[in-house]
Structure formats: C-alpha cells, structure tokens
Amino acid sequence: ETNSQSLRLWESLSNAVFEDKKAVSRIKDKFLDSITDYIEFDGVRIDIEKDPARVKEKDSETSKEYFPLKKEYKIMEVLIKLAVDEMESGFYSSENLWPNLGIWVSLHSIYKTIKSTTGKAKYNYTQIKEAITILSKTHVSMVAGNNEIAGTLIQMHYGSDLDDNKKAH
C-alpha cells in the first residue's frame, strides 16, 4: 500500500513539475515568472511553485531560462533507476541538513540505460548534460499544510570530462 501510494504521489507531482511545452527563454529581456500550481492527493492540497533554471549560454554572457520538460523527466527517471538498480550510491548529510541520496554515474551509463530501455540512442551526451543542468538549477517548492519541501530537483557535480567520471546526486 505504501509503495503504491508513493508511486501515485510521484506520478501526480511529476505531472505538475515537468512541462509538456517547449523550452522558453526570456521574452523581451524579461525573466520568466515562477509557475504556481497545485495537486490534490488523497484529500490533501499540495501547492507547487517552480522557478526556472537560468543557464548561461556557452561562450556567451547571455542566459536563458528553462522549465524542466519531459526530456528532463526521462533523465530523472534514469537517474532514479540507476540509483536503485546498479550504481554506487549512498546517503550522506552535513550539519543541520536532511540526509541526501548521492549516486556516482557517468554520462555513458545514462546513455546506455536510455538506449537499452528505448532500443535507440534517444539523447546524446550534450543533451543529457543539458538536462542534468536544468534539473540542477530548477527550484521547486511544495507546501502541504505547515510542511514545506523546497530545493532544486537534483544537485550536481562534474568530475573530469576526460575520464567521463561524473557525479550527479
């Protein structure tokens, strides 16, 4: 019962957090506004507020803003699958912080997982890295009653690009 409830909650939240729309950057030099929404889950209202990821363009001074799309959802699902099924993972915490789950994963293992699941290479390394960047810079707040969970969808740290040892958590 608890597992099926968790899965239903994840599905409800993911539909509210991940957009079906195309990526949007600034409109007439104005930054994108936060998006507010809510879901009802088992009679409890959960208010959701999303702030877009602000990503600096490579070799440029300009930034674009993105809300996570279905591509980012698919990459998040792969990261969860790898954390559960295969990768070196573990919980860590620092003073005054909630425990976090960290996984150590390469772009290649994400690529291989997508390919084995879909039968084709749906995203290349650059697209995977972009999706991870958007996930790590999108801030989401969820409030139900007096309880609030807020933060980025994932935190990320990259190792050397030369050896493809990447850490995303």
Image: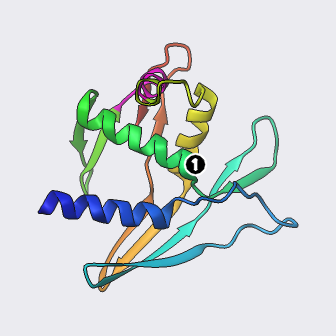
Name the quadrant of the C terminus: top left
Vertical order, 47 against 95 (above or below): below
Magenta stretch: residue 105 in it?
yes
Res. 2 in view: yes
Identify which residue is drawn at 54% across, 57% down: 138
The x, y position of residue 139, in whole percent, is 51, 62
The x, y position of residue 22, in whole percent, is 69, 55
Report helix, strand or loop for mark 1. Answer: helix
Identify which residue is drawn at 55% across, 24% down: 121
* Residue bounds of the magenta highlight: 104-113
- Looking at the image, which is closer to me, 163 or 6? 6
90 displayed left or right of 32: left
Which residue is the site of mark 1? 134
Question: Quarter of the image holding residue 7?
Answer: bottom left
The x, y position of residue 149, in whole percent, is 35, 69
Q: Amino acid at mark 1?
A: Ile
Question: Quarter of the image holding residue 52?
Answer: bottom right
The x, y position of residue 53, in whole percent, is 61, 56
Identify which residue is drawn at 88% across, 67% down: 28
